[in-house]
Amino acid sequence: MGVIDICKGSTCLIKPQIKLTFGHSDRPNCCSFERSQKSSWVSCMASTVPLNDVKEGQKQHLTGDSFIRPHLRKLSPYQSILPFEVLSTRLGRKPEDIIKLDANENPYGPPPEVFEALGAMKFPYIYPDPESRRLRAALAEDSGLEDKYILVGCGADELIDLIMRCVLEPGDKIVDCPPTFTMYEFDAAVNGALVIKVPRKSDFSLDVEMIAKVVEQEKPKCIFLTSPNNPDGSVIHDDALLKILHLPILVVLDEAYIEFSGMDSRMQWVKNHENLIILRTFSKRAALAGLRVGYGAFPLSIIEYLWRAKQPYNVSVAAEVSACAALSNPTYLETVKVALLQERERLFNLLEKVPFLNPYPSHSNFILCEVTGGKDAKKLKEDLSKMGVMIRHYNNKELSGYVRVSVGKPEQTDVLMNCLNTMS
């Protein structure tokens, strides 16, 4: 497929019914068109529009949405958490008085070096390095994986969409294993893909046998997995992952919460598995959720094409500076992680004592709870929000009877438990 350039040179790609005459136009260096008697249409790229099909006054009937791709007109927007300032206004409370345990954010904030680096930023008016070289070098040192395998994104969310744009044709299929992070299903819909859902078992583990059957019968292109899984905190062990990697499918493993699991990242695995991608983020570990910076490890045979397709200046100067500063203080990151793990254990033990909650063991910085005892999960979330405590409830049917509670600071846990105890 070629692009027609009627003003630069004499090798325009155009339908043979069109004659091009060069050098005889009133405008120098331009080519003029002489329509042949046999045709009344012009071809540009892959689209053709018969001129006699364009009727007088047709433009008057056009509406803006007629230009939108049909599958996007049916797309439901992603259900995100309310912005903090909006939430504060609605509740009539100061931001510092809200106990925010609904988005798995790190309540301790980033290392002090991040604030220092942001304050000392010299060139915010210059475009950032399109290859994020400094950050990729820091990530290589942090992970032990060479930087040629690493690509940085505006959050891991950007990388999820970039992978789909590079891999999926409209109508291709992906495998999703709900309940899980809903961004996979959302981005698949944006990219015109079909989603095959293989539900998790009652303990939230993967149904590997069913996944294998679906891959054999439906021929999906990729599967998105999360370990630890959001929203339940379960992990995928090596034996299950290896079985899936032996299938003819691209495996995208999201390790957004791996730091809290006690397990090693599988980033090194991309050297030996051509069909594996690992995604990670600074949002949880380094408390940089507001700056949007994530990264991925890719086989060299795949990363080449992602480099071609990504936006050139996708990671901001502020994001790269902050991420590098955060990695420069591993002691702080480790101290915060240990504090959150200790509080996760304490929170779990306290939630177990609430008569209408059934918490699930978690390898992440949140705990999923089944709401029992005749309580309504959505109402529980709403009642807590009126008290200034925010937890997560889901609209989908798989999780309509559940709530998810992020692990906060000890004093935040205390406020949450005081509110829950008033409801018993």
Image (cartoon, rainbow, N blue to C red):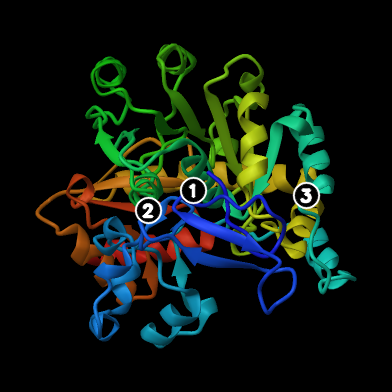
The residues bearing labels 1 and 3 have C-alpha atoms spaced at a distance of 19 Å
Q: Which residue is mark 1?
A: 161
Q: Which residue is mark 2?
A: 190
Which quadrant of the rendered structure holds the C terminus? bottom left
Q: Residue at x 74, y 53 (%)?
A: 323
The residues bearing labels 2 and 3 have C-alpha atoms spaced at a distance of 27 Å
Compared across the picture, whether 106 is left or right of 394 comes to right
Compared across the picture, whether 212 is left or right of 224 comes to left
Q: Secondary structure at mark 3?
A: loop
Residue placed furthest toward the left:
374
Q: Amino acid at mark 2?
A: Val
Residue 313 on image: x %, y %? 71, 58
Q: Nearer the viewer, residue 193 or 297?
A: 193
Numbered circle sitting on residue 132: 3
In the rendered picture of this protein, how many numbered marks are placed on residues? 3
Q: Amino acid at mark 3?
A: Ser
